[in-house]
Image (cartoon, rainbow, N blue to C red):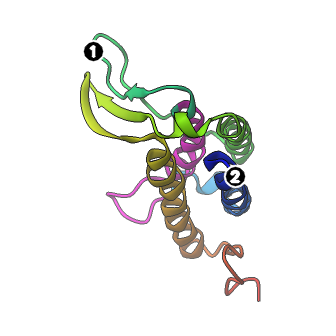
């Protein structure tokens, strides 16, 4: 079995549970945040949806520069509504799954680098980036998002087993 084939079922499972969380976000709470240093609900949710696009890009390129010399720095514009958020999520999820499905084991072992202004922030095998900096990163932020749900009295969906709201 190829590396990508072994990762696809895990990705599918995490996508399904992440989408359940995003579906519950009411647009009227998009500006809410639990602390001054925290992202807004829309900012956090958009970040999660955008990371799926990063997964596709990571499969297709050997690096990404968040602030290229002479170019515009990477910027995330928060989704305007739950519908916009889910459309972004679905589009990026489909792109990530398609890109992952066609990534060979040889490509998985190629070094992938995150740059800023041409300087290497980190470099690791593509597979390590996909697991650690994309998939695990999505799961981490989904966990944060479930706290946002709880603090707003929005039912937390079942993720790895029943939630207190779905028993």
Tag 2 secondary structure? loop
Other-residue count near label 2 (Cα within 10 Å), few / some / many at <14 / 14–19 / ≥20? few
Q: Residue 105 lies in what quarter of the image?
A: top right
Above or below for 117 versus 15: above
Q: Nearer the viewer, residue 36 or 125?
A: 125
Q: Report the magenta stretch's main SS.
A: helix
- Residue annotated with mark 2: 1
The answer to whether marks 2 and 1 mark residues whose Cβ atoms lie closer than 8 Å is no
Secondary structure of the residue carrying tag 1 is loop
Residue at 66% x, 76% y is: 160
Query: Which residue is outermost to the top?
Result: 70
Q: Which residue is mark 1?
A: 69
Q: Quadrant of residue 113?
A: top left
Say which of 160 and 44 sits in front: 160
Where 69 falls versus 127 (above or below)?
A: above
Residue 38, magenta (yes or no): yes
Q: Residue at x 32, y 24 (%)?
A: 67
- The span shown in magenta is 33-57
Left or right of residue 33: residue 25: right
Q: Decide if residue 132 is on the left or right side of residue 68.
A: right
Horizontal side, residue 92 vs residue 71: left or right: right
Residue 124 lies, in percent from the top left, at 36, 42
In which quadrant will I find the C terminus?
bottom right
């Amino acid at each position: 079995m190829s590396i990508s084939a072994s990762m696809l079922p895990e990705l599918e499972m995490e996508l399904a549970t992440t989408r359940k969380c995003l579906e519950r976000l009411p647009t009227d709470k998009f500006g809410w945040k639990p602390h001054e240093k925290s992202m807004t609900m829309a900012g956090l949710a958009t970040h999660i949806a955008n990371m799926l696009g990063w997964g596709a890009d990571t499969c297709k390129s050997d690096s990404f520069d968040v602030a290229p010399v002479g170019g515009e720095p990477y910027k995330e514009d928060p989704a305007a509504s739950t519908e916009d958020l889910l459309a972004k999520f679905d589009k990026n999820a489909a792109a990530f799954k398609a890109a992952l499905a066609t990534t060979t084991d040889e490509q998985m072992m190629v070094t992938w680098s995150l740059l800023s202004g041409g300087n290497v922030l980190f470099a690791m095998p593509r597979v390590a980036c996909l697991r650690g900096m994309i998939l695990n990163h999505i799961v981490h932020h989904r966990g944060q998002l479930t706290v946002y749900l709880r603090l707003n009295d929005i039912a937390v969906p079942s993720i790895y087993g029943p939630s207190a709201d779905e028993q």
